[in-house]
């Protein structure tokens, strides 16, 4: 998915950019970058993060990034920030999201004899495309609005100029942007969790299609928000850091609500409730508090020498890292009926391995409770659950086993309690060797978040799409 952090200050802001961007490392895996501007011009550094953490790569660069205004990014796709020379002046841009119509917009640019200089894994760099769309108009306001209007999918952005930073949220607000304030400085971030330890307080949640301009003296609205929103529901379930809030709704509290909703529908008895570290812990705490079943830790995570499990680019290595990080506790597992909570089941490979270990350590029953509905549609709007094949998704693999084809109507499979939905779940249970498996009902998830359904993107569960 990726995340960005921008700062404007009456003092030097390189330390804020360094730590603020680092606090978004859970959102991306491939590239990190920072750009600043001062009286001598723009300064930029970009590093590959595939085999190391942000801090270790940027620590030696931070003193070179002078100035009191800057932007930083953690990206799971292209190299950023992009620095552009244009008739609007020199500027830097970072983006978060997924441009679904990237090829169409590139063809339109080619028809106007525009060329692309940057490369992103051999393809057009989305951030450079955004910079071109901005440069097509007579002002930054008009240019950013042009990008917002033409892009399908999602694309929020920060634009660094020599006079301030523009923060713009994508047209339907799929990705969040929040403004923070402290004495002598303002910041814009994908996650409010980046603010706390830097002394910022959330001041304003940027609306869909809104444009904000920040200077060290304050911020102003350049374009009012639109009246339609499709923020990604998975932010609260999975992506977001527990400290973060979106639309004023805290992530950890939503996860408690998810676990509570699952517990209210529970029909089996168990000896303990546990969360898959760390993704399922908040959900499991909510489940345990509601069910009055003891919360315990059959697994503990060992992190000093193991990277995030999604950092290695090879799937086999990701599975190995995920397994090696979790150490089982036999004394907690042996002879127990365990309810495990987790945020989701994407492919199911790691869960299958974990289940095998639990039985080897003496678990009597292993019940999985998932905080969201079954994923059956790859994401079209963010870089999540994207794959060369939909069959990588555990739900779609089960449907293929039932139907014998990828080309089938998924409507009934998305309906909790339907005959086809039940058959899909039974296939997943069999494949993962679980005692039982239950997914969250979509209505319960929506209630746990607390926003109306029409303001939430639920495409990966029910196939609903808005461009």
Image (cartoon, rainbow, N blue to C red):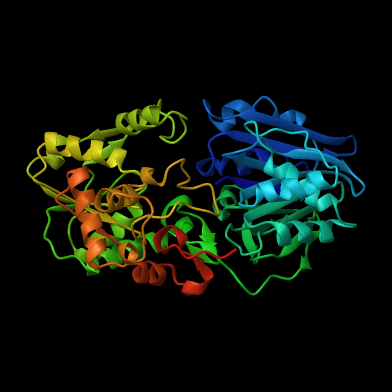
Judge whether residue 135 can be spotted in this image.
yes
Q: Residue at x 71, y 65 (%)?
A: 210
Asked whether, in this view, residue 266 is left or right of residue 227, the answer is: left
Residue occupying the point 49% across, 53% down = 379
Question: Front-most of 420 and 36?
Answer: 420
In-front residue for pair 345/431: 431
Image quarter hosting the C terminus: bottom right
Which quadrant of the view contains residue 319? top left
Residue 275 versus residue 36 in the image, above or below: below
Please say if 318 is above or below 405.
above
How many marks the image carries: the answer is: 0
Residue appearing at x 53%, y 30% in the figure: 53
Please state the horizontal and vertical placement of residue 29, each as a whole percent of the image.
Answer: 53, 36
267 sits left or right of 226 in the view: left
In the rendered view, would you say 221 is above or below 162?
below
- Please give left or right for residue 117 compared with residue 237 in the image: right
Determine if residue 302 is in view. Answer: no
Q: Position of residue 339 (x, y in %)?
A: 19, 53
Residue 143 in the image: x percent, y percent? Answer: 82, 56
**Residue 120 position within the rendered picture, expressed as x and y whole percent measured from the top left:** 65, 34
Instruction: Name the outermost residue toward the right.
Output: 87
Identify the residue shown where x is 83% and y is 40%: 84
The answer to which image quadrant residue 356 occupies is: top left
In the image, is residue 42 above or below residue 219? Answer: above
Left or right, residue 378 beside residue 159: left
């Amino acid at each position: 998915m990726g995340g960005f952090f921008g700062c404007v200050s009456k003092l030097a802001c390189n330390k804020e950019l360094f730590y603020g961007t680092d606090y978004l490392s859970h959102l991306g895996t491939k590239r990190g970058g920072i750009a600043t501007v001062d009286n001598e011009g723009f300064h930029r550094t970009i590093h590959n993060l595939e085999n190391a953490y942000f801090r270790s790569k940027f620590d030696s660069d931070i003193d070179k990034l002078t100035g009191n205004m800057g932007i930083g990014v953690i990206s799971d796709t292209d190299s950023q920030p992009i620095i552009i020379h244009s008739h609007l002046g020199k500027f830097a841009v970072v983006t978060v999201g997924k441009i679904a119509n990237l090829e169409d917009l590139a063809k339109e640019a080619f028809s106007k004899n525009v060329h692309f200089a940057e490369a992103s894994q051999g393809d057009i760099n989305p951030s450079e495309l955004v910079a071109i769309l901005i440069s097509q108009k007579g002002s930054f306001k008009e240019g950013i609005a042009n990008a917002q209007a033409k892009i399908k999918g999602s694309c929020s952005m920060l634009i660094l100029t020599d006079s301030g930073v523009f923060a713009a949220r994508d047209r339907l607000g799929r990705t969040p942007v929040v403004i923070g304030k402290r004495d002598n400085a303002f910041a814009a971030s994908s996650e409010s969790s980046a603010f706390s330890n830097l002394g910022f307080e959330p001041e304003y949640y940027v609306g869909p299609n809104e444009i904000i301009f920040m200077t060290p003296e304050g911020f102003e609205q350049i374009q009012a928000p639109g009246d339609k929103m499709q923020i990604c529901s998975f932010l609260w379930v999975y992506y977001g850091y527990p400290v973060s809030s979106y639309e004023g709704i805290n992530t950890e509290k939503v996860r408690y609500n998810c676990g509570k909703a699952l517990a209210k529908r529970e029909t089996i008895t168990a000896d303990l409730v546990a969360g898959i570290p760390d993704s399922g812990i908040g959900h499991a705490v909510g489940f345990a508090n509601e069910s009055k079943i003891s919360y315990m830790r059959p697994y503990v995570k060992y992190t000093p020498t193991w990277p995030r499990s999604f950092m290695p680019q090879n799937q086999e290595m990701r599975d190995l890292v995920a397994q090696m990080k979790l150490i089982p506790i036999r004394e907690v597992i042996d002879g127990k009926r365990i309810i495990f909570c987790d945020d989701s089941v994407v492919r199911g490979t790691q869960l299958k391995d974990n289940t095998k270990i639990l039985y080897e350590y003496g678990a009597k029953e292993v019940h999985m409770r998932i905080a969201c509905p079954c994923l059956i549609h790859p994401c079209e709007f963010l870089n999540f659950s994207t794959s060369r094949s939909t069959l990588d998704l555990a739900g779609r693999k089960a449907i293929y086993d039932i139907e014998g084809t990828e080309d089938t109507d998924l409507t009934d499979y998305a309906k909790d309690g339907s005959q086809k939905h039940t058959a899909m779940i039974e296939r997943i249970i069999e494949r993962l060797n679980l005692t039982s498996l239950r997914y969250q009902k979509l209505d319960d998830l929506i209630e746990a978040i607390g926003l109306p359904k029409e303001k939430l993107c639920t495409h990966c569960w029910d196939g609903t799409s808005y461009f």
